[in-house]
Amino acid sequence: MEQATASSAVIALIIAVGFLSRRLGILRAGDERVLNGFVYFFAFPAFLFSKLAEIRFGPETLRFLAAGAAPIAALLSFLWLARVALGLSRDRFYLLAVGSVFGSLAFFGLPFIEVVLGPEEPVRLAVAMIAAVAPVTVGLVLVLLELYGLEGVSAGRAILDVLRKFSRNPLIISLALGVAVSLSGVGLPLFLGKTLELLGGAAAPVALFSLGVFLYGRRFGGLTQAAVLASLRLLFLPALTFLFAWWWDLGPAAREVAVLMNGTPIAVNMLVLSARYRFFEGKIAALILISTLGALFTMNLWVFLV
């Protein structure tokens, strides 16, 4: 627990340095786009590709991935039943669904896992979960937003639009290439592996620093409601994940990684999507703030409990 707390302090400090860079005028509004562009198009694709190429997808790994994906499906089913039984409005259902499934697996979960649990097996498991869960949850969120923004559009048309966007997404492309190399059993050439390792090594610190830059100067409203919504992502979903991991008898490392990855805060990219689709922009900004700060506490709590 002491190691996890110290590691979280490191993460919080990197975020704070990014925040102060804006406060002191070193960086200006909009500079985070350059940082995010580097991470999104270069650093994280290199990291994901190189790590996935090393993974061997055996029965144990597949069981671990199922333990990460099944709780998300169960939570969405629960929300849908609540909408039917309790008469939740369409808008409220969309907000609950998007706010609970679109976690920051790569930009927050991966750095946390690497710092707290170590750079070897835990990171490989985390990358495997990103490969299996992130494309599904991102695709689901995009479909929901398409349906929300274009009421009356068929689900089939929304799914086709999402697939077109996936075909140009650098993270999705790197995940697909990494899985292909892994399944082929062919290792990466030494020069390529070293290049990807150096480039990918910048992903975690730059992503956390950029998060601090992003948080500065934002207007946040409805913090109490955001805290209630964040509890789905930070408390309910990881608790559900722990039950699935225990039921399927995962090993200690796999169980811990699954719970932590499903306990990450909502993805920062959701702010861009909320603006594009005019989807509760103020509430999403507040949710990002509350879930990010809250995750520094709750994820340490899960390290201690699990």
Image: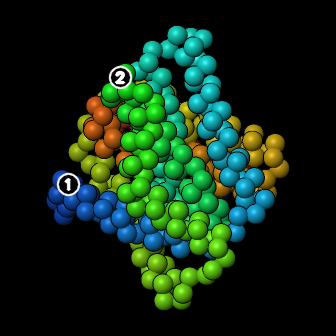
| Foreground: disc 2 or disc 1 | 2
Kindly indicate the quadrant of the structure image that contains residue 41.
bottom left
**Residue 208 seen in the figure:** no
The mark total stands at 2
Residue placed most toward the observer, 275 or 221: 275
* Residue 151 badge: 2
Between disc 2 and disc 1, whose residue precedes? 1
Locate residue 304 relative to residue 166 in the image: left or right: right
Classify mark 2: residues with Cα within 10 Å, few (<14), some (14-19) or many (20+): few
Residue at image point 66% right, 47% down: 68
Q: Is residue 299 above or below residue 34?
A: above
The part of the image, by quadrant, that contains residue 13 is: bottom left
Compared across the picture, whether 38 is left or right of 259 comes to left
**Distance between the alpha carbons at the discs numbered 2 and 1:** 32 Å
Give coordinates of residue 158: x percent, y percent: 41, 35
Residue 121 point in image, percent of width and height: 67, 68
Query: Front-most of 196 and 259?
Result: 196
Residue 256 in the image: state x and y as whole percent. Answer: 69, 54
Secondary element at image label 1: loop
In front: 259, or 49? 49
Rendered-image quadrant of the N terminus: bottom right
Residue situated in front as seen by the camera: 157 or 228: 157
Q: Is residue 231 left or right of residue 54?
A: left
Query: In the drawing, what numbered circle is on residue 30?
Result: 1
Residue at figure coordinates x 37%, y 57% from the top left:
168
Mark 2: which amino acid?
Glu
Taking the spot 59% from the left edge, 65% from the top edge, the residue there is 179
* x and y percentages locating residue 70 in the rendered image: 68, 40
In the rendered image, the residue lying farthest to the bottom is: 191
